Image: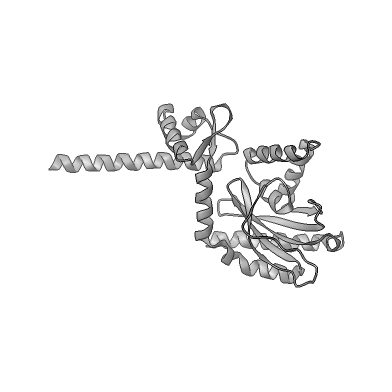
């Protein structure tokens, strides 16, 4: 009887330790700025390569990870599904709505809430401008991270693997893309705290967007103030930027307090 009890406890401890290792590997990927391989993971977590290999195979079989270049791995589509589920449980829309509404009232332009889902973003909410001519977005569809102020405000704060993917997608659309200038523009967004776009997709729309972050400093999404290009000139631009950045910081603070 005593032996049986002891065996159960040992199995329980071993299972807990194994679960901890799997969780540590996933967290390492969540924090990584590039694809990870067996050797780097083993060294970072103090595990044997054999153990890391087994964990990677298990996570890959469940699409929590997927193979990348050179025997490395990145987060997979199931991780994206978990991220979307986390958003629904967090109810970021309710948390951000009073801040977005106030920004709309201050700017008289449509304000939007975008969230990062995997390697894309979605519009989760918007408050429409009271003006007759205005910008309105569609909630729900996924958008790439390479174009538009709302996307680039997020991309500028993501690991290099996201930037490389976005550049690859954009080069497929624009063969004349100046990659160095594009990456430099992302660095400027990161430095100044906001992104802007003027008629970027030929739709006559303009936007100012700023990112918001979780308590650990990880980018979670962006908010924007958007409208016709004709209302987004130089006059009052910095005041408009200040309002958007302040609202994004308020959402970051609200997330930290949630």
Name the spot of residue 183 as percent of width and height, x first: 74, 40
At a point 41% along the width and 32% down the height, the residue shown is: 54
**Residue at position x 77%, y 44% in the image:** 185
Q: Where is residue 232 shown, x and y percent of the image?
A: 83, 61
* Front in this rendered view, residue 220 or 6: 220
Residue drawn 44% across and 43% down?
Answer: 23
Residue situated in front as seen by the camera: 195 or 217: 195
Q: In the rendered view, tell whether residue 78 sits above or below residue 199.
A: above
Vertical arrangement, residue 48 with respect to residue 150, above or below: above
Please determine whether, in this image, residue 62 is positioned above or below residue 250.
above
Percent coordinates x, y for residue 211 in the rendering: 66, 54
Total marks placed? 0
Q: In the displayed structure, does residue 121 sit left or right of residue 230?
A: left
Determine the image quadrant of residue 204: bottom right
* Residue shown at 55% from the left, 54% from the top: 215
Quadrant in which the N terminus is drawn: top left
Q: Is residue 54 left or right of residue 222?
A: left
Front residue of this view, candidates 84 and 250: 84
Q: Quadrant of residue 62?
A: top left
């Amino acid at each position: 009887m005593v032996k049986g009890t002891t065996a159960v406890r040992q199995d329980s401890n071993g299972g807990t330790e194994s679960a901890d290792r799997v969780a540590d590997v996933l967290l390492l990927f969540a924090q990584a700025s590039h694809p990870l391989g067996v050797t780097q993971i083993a060294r970072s977590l103090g595990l044997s390569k054999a153990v890391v290999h087994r964990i990677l195979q298990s996570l890959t079989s469940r699409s929590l990870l997927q193979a990348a270049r050179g025997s490395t791995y990145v987060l997979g589509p199931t991780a994206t599904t978990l991220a979307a589920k986390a958003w629904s449980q967090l109810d970021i829309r309710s948390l951000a709505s009073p801040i977005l509404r106030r920004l709309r009232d201050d700017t008289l332009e449509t304000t939007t809430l975008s969230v990062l889902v995997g390697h894309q973003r979605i519009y989760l909410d918007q408050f429409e401008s009271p003006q007759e001519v205005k910008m309105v977005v569609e909630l729900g569809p996924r958008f790439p991270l390479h174009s538009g102020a709302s996307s680039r405000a997020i991309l500028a704060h993501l690991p290099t693997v996201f930037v490389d993917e976005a550049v690859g997608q954009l080069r497929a659309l624009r063969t004349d893309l100046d990659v160095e200038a594009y990456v430099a523009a992302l660095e400027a967004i990161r430095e100044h705290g906001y992104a802007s776009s003027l008629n970027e997709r030929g739709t006559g729309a303009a936007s100012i967007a700023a990112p918001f972050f979780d308590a650990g400093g990880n980018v979670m999404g962006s908010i924007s103030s958007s409208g016709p290009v004709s209302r987004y000139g130089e006059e009052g631009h910095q005041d408009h930027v200040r309002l958007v950045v302040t609202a994004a910081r308020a959402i970051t603070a609200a997330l930290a307090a949630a």
